[in-house]
Amino acid sequence: MNVKEMMTSQVYTCSPTTPLNSVAMTMWNNDCGAVPVVDDQQNPIAMITDRDIAMGAALQKKPLWELNARDITDSQQLYKCETETDIEQALDLMREHSVRRLPVVNSQGKLAGIVTSGDIIARSNSADDAELPFYRTEGMLKAVTGHHAPMPLTV
């Protein structure tokens, strides 16, 4: 099974210069917890989550309208996959890097969609002979929902 079979194709995006209050409203209005940051050619360059927004504003001690997406994603490593990537490879990538969402790109590197842990869980099946048995999702779930060591607070 390929990622394209379970990804969400309608994805709301922002640019690196989009103010964080606009990104937050996009998330609120569209019931999503993450928005890919794309360049002018629609290539994903970062992923911004609701938690990133909250922590970025708190740590920088600035209101959302004074910050933009670049302010909190510049040092971020982006993990992504292609539409033809096998879902098990995507699971491994999510588990290895403890990410809940992967931007999906087409053969030209343009954003084609997003695949989330929720998308994968919804398609998992408890039968061992299923196309995506639940035991394959277990490791990813543990990795992305487990507690991580706290990062040092810089003031």
Image (cartoon, grey):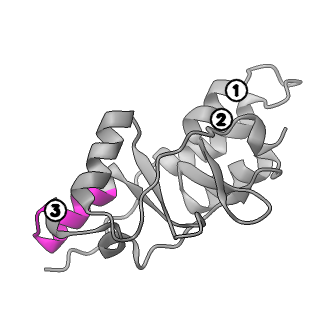
Q: Quadrant of the C terminus?
A: bottom left
Dividing the picture into quadrants, the one containing residue 26 is top left
Give me the residue at 53% from left, 44% from top: 11
Q: Position of residue 17 (x, y in %)?
A: 34, 70
Dividing the picture into quadrants, the one containing residue 130 is top right
Q: Main secondary structure of the magenta part?
A: helix
Q: Position of residue 1 (x, y in %)?
A: 85, 38
Please state which amino acid type lies under the numbered disc 3.
Trp
Q: Is residue 59 magenta?
A: yes
Give me the residue at 40% from left, 78% from top: 74
Q: Is residue 2 magenta?
A: no
Q: Mark 2 sits on what residue?
A: 120
Task: Identify whether 27 is placed above or below 75.
Answer: above
Describe the element under mark 3 as helix, strand or loop.
helix
Q: CA distance from mark 1 to mark 3?
A: 38 Å
Q: Mark 1 sits on what residue?
A: 123
Describe the element under mark 1 as helix, strand or loop.
helix
Q: CA distance from mark 2 to mark 3?
A: 34 Å
Q: Residues within 10 Å of mark 3 (few under 14, many from 20)?
A: few
In the visual, does 47 lie left or right of 24?
right
Residue 129 seen by the camera: yes
Give me the residue at 39% from left, 43% from top: 33
In the visual, does 137 lie left or right of 77?
right
Q: Which residues are magenta?
A: 52-63
Q: Are marks 1 and 2 in contact (CB under 8 Å)?
A: yes
